[in-house]
Amino acid sequence: MTVDTRTETRVPRTIWVGLAAVVVYLFFAAVLGNVFGDLAGDDDTAEFVLSHYVPLPIAIIISVLFVRWAGWGRSVWAERPTPTLQPRRWWLVSIPVLMVLLPLVQLVDVPWGARPSGRCCW
């Protein structure tokens, strides 16, 4: 007797599902971010925290739950690491490298001497 280990996909993988995901993400980032950001009043730090750290983790959790519900989990989480892909696609490594290098390069342009010592980053 053989056991079928395939999982059923409830949602087909099409471009329209991706576009719907972009719309939902923009809703969370723009609309809910602005709504929560307005609750902070004049405090810039609180506005940043409320507009980014509240709606975006909610959107990420909803996305992960959707991937699980849609039946895409096995193929999404089983993606091979970039350096092991055949043919080699080393240009994909440039994305995380640039994400680290760009802020480091910009540190030189910050006038550190003019910044007050009691204020860290904002």
Image (cartoon, helix red, strand yellow):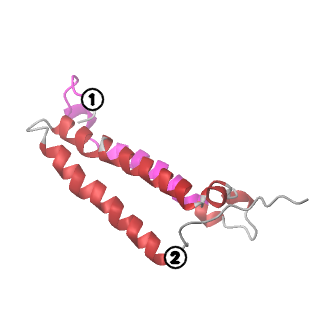
Does residue 72 lie above or below 33 as drawn?
below
Is 81 displayed left or right of 1 in the figure? left
Q: Residue at x 48, y 77 (%)?
A: 15
The residue indicated by pointer 2 is: 14
Query: As drawn, which residue projects farthest toward the left?
Result: 42
> What is the total number of numbered labels drawn onto the structure image?
2
Marks 2 and 1, how far apart at CA: 45 Å
Query: SS for tag 1?
Result: loop
Q: Residue at x 23, y 50 (%)?
A: 33
Q: Quadrant of residue 108?
A: top left
Q: Which mark is residue 92?
A: none
If you read the primary sequence from the N terminus, does the residue marked by circle 2 or circle 1 appear first?
A: 2
Q: Position of residue 18 (x, y in %)?
A: 45, 70
Q: Residue at x 19, y 34 (%)?
A: 114
The residue indicated by pointer 1 is: 120
Q: Quadrant of residue 63?
A: bottom left
Foreground residue among 14 and 99: 14
Query: As drawn, which residue projects farthest toward the right?
Result: 1
Does residue 15 lie above or below 74 as drawn?
below
Q: Position of residue 120 (x, y in %)?
A: 27, 29
* Highlighted range, magenta: 93-120
Query: SS for tag 2?
Result: loop
Q: Is residue 118 magenta?
A: yes
Q: Residues within 10 Å of mark 2 (few under 14, many from 20)?
A: few
Q: Amino acid at mark 2?
A: Thr
Q: Residues within 10 Å of mark 1 (few under 14, many from 20)?
A: few
Q: Amino acid at mark 1?
A: Cys
Q: Position of residue 77 (x, y in %)?
A: 63, 54
